[in-house]
Image (spheres, rainbow, N blue to C red):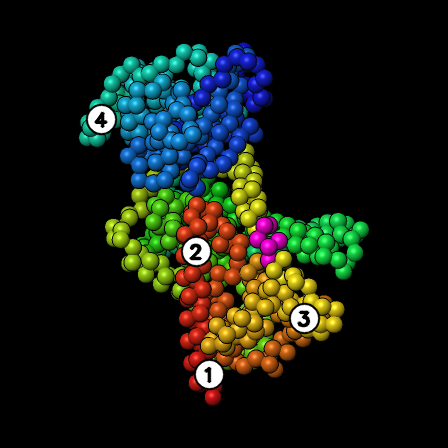
Amino acid sequence: MSNTLSHTAVDSPLETRRIALVGNPNCGKTALFNLLTGSKQKVANYAGVTVERKEGRCKVSEQLSVQILDLPGAYSLDATSPDEAVTRDVLHGQYQGEAQPELIICVMDATNLDLHLRFALELTELGRPMIIAMNMMDSAQRQGITVDIEGLSAALGIPVVETVAVHRHGASDLLKQLQHNNWSIPTQTHDRDLESRYHHVKQLLNNHVTHSDQHRSRGFDDQLDALLLNPLTGMSILATILFFIFQAVFSWAAPLMEGITAAIDILGSVVTAPLAKDSALFSMVNDGIIAGLGNVLIFLPQILILFFFILVLEESGYLPRAAYLLDKLMFRAGLTGRAFIPLLSSFACAIPGIMATRSIQDPRDRLITILVAPLMTCSARLPVYTLLIAAFIPRQQVAGLFNLQGVVLFALYFAGILSALLVAYVMKWLQKDKSEHALLMELPAYRIPNIRDLAMGLMQRASIFLRRVGGIIFSLTILLWVFCTFPSAPADYTGAAIDYSIAGRLGHGLAIIFAPIGFNWQICIALIPGMAAREVAVSALATVYAMSGSDELVSHKLGELISQQWSVPTALSLLAWFVFAPQCLSTLAVIRRETNSWRTMGFAAFYLFALAYLASLIVFQVSTLLLN
């Protein structure tokens, strides 16, 4: 039989067995999973947690197919993270709704056996059928590392096979082993004591792993680490990389987002062409369904570009080093080095930023990062900031060098960063868990990212985003349309239609609550449809003031109008409000999905609104006193 992998579905009534891939993070386990299963994968979440569940099928022979479960990376079965807890429970057969695997394939990095062998020994203590896949054997050979496969297999009492997951036929030996279909438990017993296990690993390495003299150092990897982990040069290089990513998320996504918007507009015109434009059905389809679809898909380019860079940094081995460099700085604010990239990505949009927190293993640190991510100044705030700054801040020079309007915009960005760090510090201080969570991670060998793995990773991220987030955002957008449309205004009503709707009436009621921070009823109404997305508040204000015309004309007229009708303290108060307020149901929906908790989402909404109200109250009252 050919050793080429087959990913076709198995229609034969013959045997299908379940196996699980297990290993330390960065061992190449997911690459091996992709090689074995190809596109025949399903990605979901384990019940009750946000830990990803990947399962795929591989046809091993005409008589056997295997259902492969890619378990989350783990360093030990003594779980210290949600990922490790899921791996432990599945292997013990204690996870609800998840069958215990019939075979464990422990994937190990041949270039770092000191760490990986400890976990392998721990897995043998389960007494389950097991195979070791010695991955990255090509990298080991380049580093002068020779592994006695047969001797190691005899010492462990389980089959050990070589794999190179980035090569097309890199799993041929593993497939041959699976074809035997007579899997048995390890024939050797190993000490459960941690110290004994450590000494056992040393013995195995001495007996079955050799290093050639000319390759004892890591060579090129060590040279790169000397440059990239240096406090001075490393931070400079990291800043350059992050600046490039930050720019790419904005600039590369812009034409794609415009293309999606144009496609949605075309779709809307085609779908609504047979409908009467003054009918409720037209409004629901055009303003509710089509607009809701656009609000979901518009985020996709930023999601994919962001995760492309994250996957490249992760696959190349650089991401753990970036976290190491930033850990001391972030730790002072109650965060971790792993939180930096999620927070940075939140400048484009909090949605991909919150999703990127999955790289944070510690549950406490991940939760704090999720809760402060909305404080980053996302691109959706810019239309509001631009409108208010242009209307109320004069175009004049500061110190002969800087534009006052630009200084104010920078101050708003800085306010978001500073508030996130302060909130993170307070949250850590208030929590019962006062322990210091040190950043412990393996620094893997550098490697060139595999195009197949990058493509499959992006496809999975796109699917996850559309499936998990799309439904919630879409439903809430339709609900907001209903509130902003009904009841319809009478034929003789001369005001804005939204004023007569449920949202409009609510706005008048809210004006009493928001009067202390300087908001009038028009602003309160605009904030309601603006819940779908912050930038909607600008068009909602235009609707309230019965504006019409092109976007440029609307913005110009609206700016002139509010500059005449609003006081400067009101404008400054609204700017302060948008620094903090979670006026984005999409973000709240993602917090709910990522934490699997309505309570956490409610807390995020409450504390952000409370901060927004307090900040606006201070700004409005102080500026009123100073300007009077």
Q: Foreground: 487 or 588?
A: 487
Which residue is identified by label 1?
624
Badge 1 crowding class, 10 Å Cα cut-off, few under 14, some 14 to 19, many 20 or more, is some
Q: Earlier in the sequence, mark 2 or mark 1?
A: 2
How many angstroms separate mark 2 from mark 1 (CA)? Answer: 32 Å
Which residue sits at x=34%, y=49%?
Answer: 364
Badge 3 crowding class, 10 Å Cα cut-off, few under 14, some 14 to 19, many 20 or more, is some
Q: Is residue 479 magenta?
A: yes
Q: Is residue 350 magenta?
A: no
Can you tell which mark lies on residue 192? Answer: 4
Which residue is identified by label 3?
496
Q: Foreground: 549 or 233?
A: 549
Foreground mark, 3 or 1?
3
Q: Is residue 5 left or right of residue 358?
A: right
* Quadrant position of residue 173: top left
Q: Earlier in the sequence, mark 1 or mark 4?
A: 4
How many angstroms separate mark 4 from mark 3 (CA)? Answer: 74 Å
| SS at circle 3 | loop
Name the residue type under label 4.
Arg
Badge 4 crowding class, 10 Å Cα cut-off, few under 14, some 14 to 19, many 20 or more, is few
Foreground mark, 2 or 4?
2
Give the magenta range.
474-480
How many angstroms separate mark 1 from mark 4 (CA)? Answer: 70 Å
Foreground mark, 4 or 3?
3
Spot occupied by residue 516 in the image (x, y as percentages of width and height): 46, 77
Q: Is residue 510 left or right of residue 281?
A: left
| SS at circle 1 | helix
Spot occupied by residue 176 in the image (x, y as percentages of width and height): 46, 14
Q: Foreground: 411 or 596?
A: 596
Name the residue type under label 3.
Ala
Q: Earlier in the sequence, mark 3 or mark 2?
A: 3
Decide if residue 589 is in sight here.
Answer: yes
